[in-house]
Image: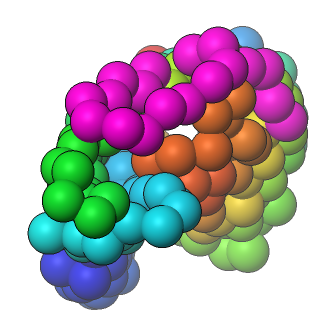
Amino acid sequence: MKKILFAVAASAAVFATSSAFAAPDDAGTGYIGLGVVGSHYKFDVPNTTTSSDRSGDKATGKIYAGYNIDKTWAIEGGYTDFGKKGYDYTVGTGAGHIQTDAYSYYVAGKGSFAVNEQVSLFGKLGVARNHNAVSTTGIASVSGGDNKSALYGSIGAEYAVNKNVKVSLEYENYGKNNIDLGRKNGAITAGLRYNF
């Protein structure tokens, strides 16, 4: 995840040296975007020893689209694929494995505040539909459904490369999964979007 953050910071520094002017988003326009998502995984299985890490970070992807109601307000929806992550464990002499496969859909209202002609701060608030499928081998067992709706929120900043292209960095919280193994609630996303 450090490499992702470094790449975004380096890109922003390069863009900052340009003399690009970017007007605020026009009312009645839309946008589409792609993002690289850094998320944290953790497996809390009691009374186990491990042959792999109980926790770690994973970089995955996101697609999203939005509609600018006016220069301040927009509505946005997206799909984030958190990917698969596994954990190998032992209890006594018994070995096992837990595998999670997680993704989320969200829809949210977005409010933006322009700092200057190129930089703006934003926040999003809405609802996410989280999916976290958990499969196990060995003696560990899990209970609960794969899907859960939860409150979604985000804060971040955008840099306008030009009138149509923006890069962003944000912290997103997708809310809880129904089964609390694998992906944690929060994620850091570096995005690139095109306004049309």
Residue 31, position as x, y percentages in the image: 50, 23
Q: Which residue is depicted at the point 38% across and 66% down? A: 48
Quarter holding residue 146: top right
On screen, residue 11 above or below 154: below
On screen, residue 189 above or below 130: below
- Foreground residue, 102 or 37? 102
| Residue 3 in sight in this render | yes
Residue 3, position as x, y percentages in the image: 18, 79
Left-right relation of 28 to 29? right
Check residue 136 for magenta coloring. yes
For the magenta stretch, what is the residue range? 133-151
Q: Which residue is depicted at the point 67% across and 20% down? A: 144
- Foreground residue, 3 or 48? 48
Residue 179, position as x, y percentages in the image: 62, 34
- Foreground residue, 63 or 184? 184
Quarter holding residue 158: bottom right
Check residue 20 for magenta coloring. no
Query: Which scheme is used to colour this image of the protein?
Result: rainbow
On screen, residue 194 above or below 10: above
- In the image, farthest residue toward the front: 93
Q: Quarter of the image containing the C terminus?
A: top left
Left-right relation of 185 to 161? right
| Residue 81 in sight in this render | no
Residue 55, position as x, y percentages in the image: 36, 69
Left-right relation of 36 to 40? left
| Count of numbered labels shown in the rendering | 0
Q: Quarter of the image containing the N terminus?
A: bottom left
Q: Which residue is depicted at the point 14% across and 69% down? A: 51
Q: Which residue is depicted at the point 85% across and 35% down? A: 151
Quarter holding residue 66: top right
- Foreground residue, 78 or 111? 78
